[in-house]
Image (cartoon, rainbow, N blue to C red):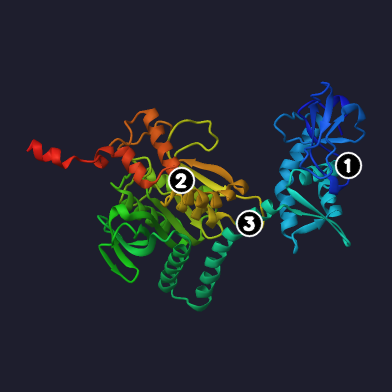
Amino acid sequence: MLSKSELKPGLRFVDLTKDYTEAILMVVVNNPSNGKVAIYTPSNLPEPIGLLELDDFVGEAFPDFNAFNTKPGGRLLEIRDLYAKSIKSFTQKIYSTEKHKITISEAKQFYISLGLTEKEAEGVLKLSIAKGFLDFDKQKSGDFVSLSELLQTFEDKKRFLQAIADEIVSKSQRIEFLVKHSATKGNYRETLLRGVLQKYIPNKYSVATGFIEGCKRQCDVIIYDSHNFSPFFIESDLVVVPQKSVRAVIEVKSTLETKTLLEALDLLADVADWRNFPAPIFKGIFAFRKKFSNDEAIAETVSNYYNNKTEEESKHGISYLYEGVNAICTLNQQCIITDLIDYKFKDLTIRPRLYSIASDIKDLNPFTATFFNELFTYLDFEKMAKKVNVSFFKDLDQDLMYKLEREIYDDTWMPQTSFQKEHDFEFESIWKRISDVTNWRAGNYTIQELEEIYFEDKYKPVDYKDNFSKK
C-alpha cells in the first residue's frame, strides 16, 4: 500500500505479505548505530526481526491509519472513514454468531462489500489483529477471527445492561396477560420497578414509596440513604423520610401521554421546590409504553411546562440550576435526559437542554440502561466504587448518539435562586458549580465533600474550652 519512500520514522504498519498468524505492528525508526531508516519489531513479540534496514525490507506496508502521527490522504483516508463507519456493525456481525467468530473469508467479504479491495480488506483485518482488537484462530475447519477478550467483555457488559430492561419487560408482560384492572397493573409496575432498582443499587440505599419531609405529595419511588438516616415513619415499603436522605424520586406511569407526563412533572416540581442542596437529587419519569409520536413531541411538552404554556393550574419554571426533571424513559422505546451544558462543547451558555438518545446497533435497546446510568450518578458511595460503577454504565456511551431536542430557555436564562455560596449569579461561579456537581457525579467528590465546599463553616472544629473562657 505504501512505497518505501513513504515509510517515514514514527510510522506504524503491518506487512501484507505476512500470514494472519504473523500480523504484528512494525515501526519505522532511525537506526541508532548508523542513523539510517530501519524497521523495528518490538522484542516482546514472537520471532522478532529486531532492526531491519529499510533497503532490505521486501514486504508490503499497510499503515496504522488511526495512529496519532499518521495523516492519511487519498485512498487511505477513504479506507479509514469506511473502517470507522463500519466498526460497530462488524463487531455486531461477529458477536451475533453462536460462537462469536466468523471465517476470514466472511470477514474479508464484509469489507469488500463496503467498497474495499481484497488486499485492503486483508490490511484492515491484519491491522485489527496486530492491535489486539481481533483474535486469529487457525483450525482444521478453517481460519477464523473473533473479538478480543477486551471487546468481548465490553459487548457482554452492554447485554447485561440490556438484560435489566428485559427483566422488567418480562414481568410487566405477565401482569398484562393476566390482569385487566388498570389500577392493579399500575401498582404492580411501581412495585416491579422498585424491586429491580433495589437489586442493583448499593446496599446503603433503600427503595420505597411514600412521602418526603415537607412535601405533601406521595411519590411512587423514593431512593433514600437508609444507612445514615432513619425514616420518620416506615410500614412495609411505605415511608416518610427526611429531605436530606433522599437521592432520587421517580414517577411511574403505565402510559406516557400528555396528561400523565404533566402530572409527573408537576409532582417532581413539588419535590424540587425549595430543596436545593449541594448534591442535587435525581428526578425521573419511567413509563412502560407511550402515546407520543416522537421524542420531539415529548421535549415540546416538557419545554411548554417549564415555560408555563400548559393549562395546568400549578405553574413551574426552573429557578435554580438542578431543579428540572433529569430523565424521562419509556421502557425499551426512548429516553430523554436533561443537562445544563452543550454536548457539542461549542456553546458556553448554561441553560436547561433536552437531549434524546439513539443507537445504530439494531439488537441493543440502550434506553432503560441510560436511565439507570443517569440515576446511578446521583447516588453516593466510596469514590473508587462509584468510579467503577459509573464506568460500567458509561461504556454504553460509545454506542449512543445524543440529539439536542429543545433548549428550554434562550441564552438569557439565569438561575433566580441560590443556596449559601452555591454561586454569585456570575458566569464563572455558575460554571464552577456545574463543574463541582459533574465531578461529584463522576466520583471525584462525595456528598460530604460537596457539603464542606459550600458549608465549610458548619464543619469547622470548635474549641469548647475557649467557649467557656469567653463566657
Lower sequence index among marks 1 and 3: 1
Lower sequence index among marks 2 and 3: 3
User: Crowding near pointer 3: few (<14 within 10 Å), some, many (20+)?
Assistant: some
Q: What residue is shown with label 3?
A: 364
Q: What residue is shown with label 2?
A: 443
Q: What residue is shown with label 1?
A: 119
Q: Can residue 309 be seen in this view?
A: no
- Residue type for callout 2: Gly
**Horizontally, is 221 left or right of 334 in the view?**
left
Label 3 element class: loop
How many numbered circles does the render carry? 3
Relative depth, front residue between 83 and 202? 202
Relative depth, front residue between 349 and 138? 138
User: Which residue is depicted at the point 34% across and 55% down?
Assistant: 246
- The quadrant holding residue 158 is bottom right
Q: Indicate whether 428 appears above or below 383.
A: above
Image spot of residue 176 (x, y percent): 51, 73
Image spot of residue 259 (x, y percent): 41, 57
User: Which residue is depicted at the point 9% across and 36% down?
Assistant: 470
Q: Which residue lies furthest to the bottom in this view?
A: 178
Q: Indicate whether 232 appears above or below 18.
A: below
Viewer-nearest of labels 1 and 3? 1
Q: In which quarter of the image is the N terminus?
A: top right
- The quadrant holding residue 424 is top left
**Horizontally, is 26 left or right of 439 in the view?**
right
